[in-house]
Image (cartoon, helix red, strand yellow):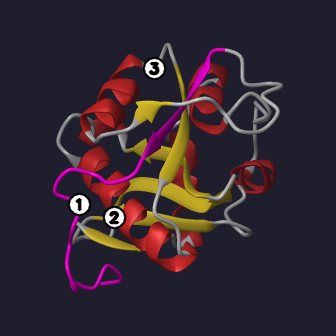
Amino acid sequence: MIFQPFDLAQLPDLMRWFPDQVSVRTWGGPQFRHPFDERSFREDAKVDSLASWSLVAQDGSLCAFGQYYLRAGRCHLGRLVVAPGLRGRGAGRRLVRELYEVGTSVLGTRECSLFVYESNTVALGLYRRLGFTEAAYPESSGGLEGMLYMVATELPESRMGSRSLHR
């Protein structure tokens, strides 16, 4: 898989990963509109305003998607998702590691944060295995019911050296 900036031509593929309101809101948060169309999905996913990245297979198919941005002084990871048919095969681990490395470097931070619904036990398990721990959210927490705020200072085996992440 290749880690690269998200290609807007793959937006329809990404949209297909969310067949219902529960799946899109678990991924995109409670404000994400459903039903959605390409315009509303693009707006709510903020693909035009946030650093949006993907893992792409050799054949060009979209395997995973995620974003990073500065939030509360940390590189915040958001809207992390793996293609339904690839879940449980290491793509999520790879995506988080790649976003962590490029995001902390670009933003000049030492820590990453993310939100996850407590009910999303598979994602929660992955984040814990990667070294994320629960922390108090440093800002107003309105609208975050049922979510955990997690922080990591370093990921296990996350040092990728001088290897280019933009290939």
Q: x%, y% of residue 84?
A: 35, 36
Question: For mark 2, does the 10 Å Cα neighbourhood hold few (<14), some (14 to 19), or many (20 or more) residues?
Answer: many
In the rendered image, the quadrant that contains the N terminus is: bottom left
Q: Is residue 39 left or right of residue 74?
A: right
From this view, report whether residue 60 is shown above or below residue 119.
below
Q: Is residue 137 left or right of residue 165?
A: right
> Mark 2 or mark 1: which is in front?
1
Mark 2 — residue? 98
Nearer-the-camera pick, 126 or 87: 126
* Residue kind at label 2, given as amino acid type: Glu
Q: Earlier in the sequence, mark 2 or mark 1?
A: 2
Secondary structure beneath label 2: helix
From this view, report whether residue 33 is shown above or below residue 120.
below
Q: Do the residues labelled 2 and 1 touch (CB within 8 Å)?
A: no
Q: x%, y% of residue 68?
A: 56, 60
Mark 3 — residue? 120
Can you see residue 111? yes
The magenta segment = 146-167
* Residue kind at label 3, given as amino acid type: Asn
Mark 1 — residue? 158
Residue 117, quarter of picture:
top right
Q: Is residue 127 left or right of residue 53?
A: left
Q: Is residue 59 magenta?
A: no
Residue 94, quarter of picture:
bottom left
